Amino acid sequence: MKRLASIACALTLVLCASMAQAEIFMGIMPNDSIADIKRKFPNATFEDIRPAWLQDEDRLIKIEGGGLGGTIVVRATDDRAFWKYLFDSQDCNNAQKRETPDCIRWRYLATGNSDEFHYVESVKFIPIREIKAGTIIKRYGKPDEVDINETFTKYICWDVGVCAIISDTEPLNDSVVSAVEYRFTDSDMEKWRKTKQQKIKPKTE
């Protein structure tokens, strides 16, 4: 319920503070569904993976294929639960309400195809060739954060929503990058939710 409440706030409130607009990796946008990504990479192979920490509403998809320069891993969240929450909370099963425009739309959004209604939250790129941290630092500048997480993995992050997992090597520029993650910012997701409401409409007979 806390998750649903936070989404509802994002729909109705202007965020007081947010990060700068995030970096976009290989054209994967914050309003993209899994179906959108499959259309963008028609010759790639897609594999659902289920690590122990993955939540039921999420999907983690590995994308591989020639020309990608490595493996792309996309994390996507199923938004249908939110639309079902709106449908139920507004009593849309009531005979007087069920055919109103909002209830028709919420019913459609709550029962759509999984690929069409899982939306991208983050993108991870695992390169084939060796990349040094200095190469990424040249692109984004001095990291805003350098730290080691609870699994003793070292990472560097920038406020544009980019983090790189690196080896524990000094100097920092000589560290080897094992993966780069692109996370969409609060402002990106706010813009996405407004856009999504406008572009997704029930299919008519």
Image: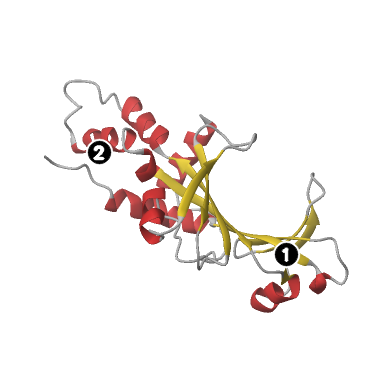
State how the image is colored. Answer: secondary structure
- Name the residue carrying label 2: 105
Q: CA distance from mark 1 to mark 2?
A: 44 Å
Q: Quadrant of residue 202?
A: top left
Q: Residue at x 20, y 27 (%)?
A: 98
Between residue 122 and residue 15, name the one nearer to us: 122
Q: Amino acid at mark 2?
A: Arg
170 above or below 36?
below
- Name the residue carrying label 1: 177
95 above or below 201?
above
Q: Amino acid at mark 1?
A: Val
Q: Secondary structure at mark 1?
A: strand
Left or right: where 38 falls relative to 203:
right
Point out the residue furthest to the left here: 205
Q: Quadrant of residue 90?
A: top left
Left or right: where 149 falls relative to 74:
right
Image position, residue 49 (x, y; %): 56, 41
Image position, residue 97 (x, y; %): 20, 27
